[in-house]
Image (cartoon, grey):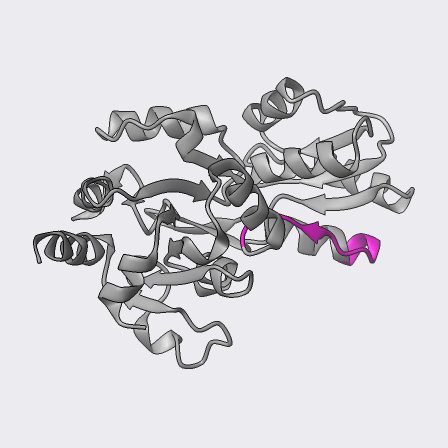
Amino acid sequence: MDKKELLRTTKLFVLDMDGTFYLGNRILPGAADFLRAVRAAGKEYLFFTNNSSRSPEEYIRKLAGMGCPIARSQIMTSGDVTIRYLKTHFAGKTVYLMGTPPLEESFRAAGIPLTQGQPDIVVVAFDTTLTYEKLSHACTCIRNGALFLATHLDINCPTETGFIPDCGSFCAAIGLSTGKKPKYLGKPFAETVEMVLDQTGFVRESVAFVGDRLYTDVATGVNNGAKGILVLTGETHLEDVGASAVKPDGIYASLGEMGELLAQMAQS
């Protein structure tokens, strides 16, 4: 699809964060201008991150500190999707959560009954406070019959100094130990798209998932009836696209380029 036509037909941009909108604590060039162009065009945006180690409130504070204030309705995480999935399909079931204290607080605030004993469900997240005791207990619970869920499938998390193990890596270790595989949530799975649509009221054909990863950000759109847009400011390089089974609907150098095109369209 033509670059401008893709932007014209998109009503809601669901934006990845690290590697797409910012890198570490620095907003990428042109990204803030893109948000202004979206608003000027009468369109909307929503941030979505698979990183479940932080609460939405923490991301709101981080963005505000960068000069980008947003409302709670403009940020969603894989933790939010997992909470919604549990409340919809497993209301009242006990959960052992292998996650950070902020994620535990989010689960408790949503009324998810957490336990340190044998649970009905084990939920594995991006736990930057992981200990061997936590890992061992998760494995024991799964061997004893607990359902195995994971907030997202990312194997590594990018940082300014390189990659660190993410949720998918933890699940690989648990899977090798227990012989069980998890049901993954977050991007690129249907539960994420359904939550975005329910929360915003948009139809999927008018929604574009934008990010720097083909197998999560872009795949969320193209595999679920929405649009998938790749930006080349993070993990994926242009030469990676040819070898990928996931083909984006559009490729842009950055959010900055997308903002420039939106501004040009507004003037024409």
Q: The C terminus appears in which quarter of the rendering?
A: bottom left
For residue 227, above or below residue 47? below
Q: Which residues are magenta?
A: 176-187
On screen, residue 39 versus residue 173, left or right, reads left
Front-most of residues 187 and 201: 201
Q: Please provide percent x and percent y for residue 89.
A: 77, 38
Q: Is residue 1 above or below residue 214?
A: below
Q: Nearer the viewer, residue 205 or 22?
A: 205
Residue 3 magenta-drawn? no
- 24 left or right, relative to 89: left
Q: Nearer the viewer, residue 179 or 11?
A: 11
Report the residue at 39% width, 40% height from top.
Answer: 46
Is residue 186 among the parts visible in the rendering?
no
Q: Residue at x 73, y 35 (%)?
A: 88
Q: Residue at x 28, y 37 (%)?
A: 25
Q: Quadrant of residue 98?
A: top right
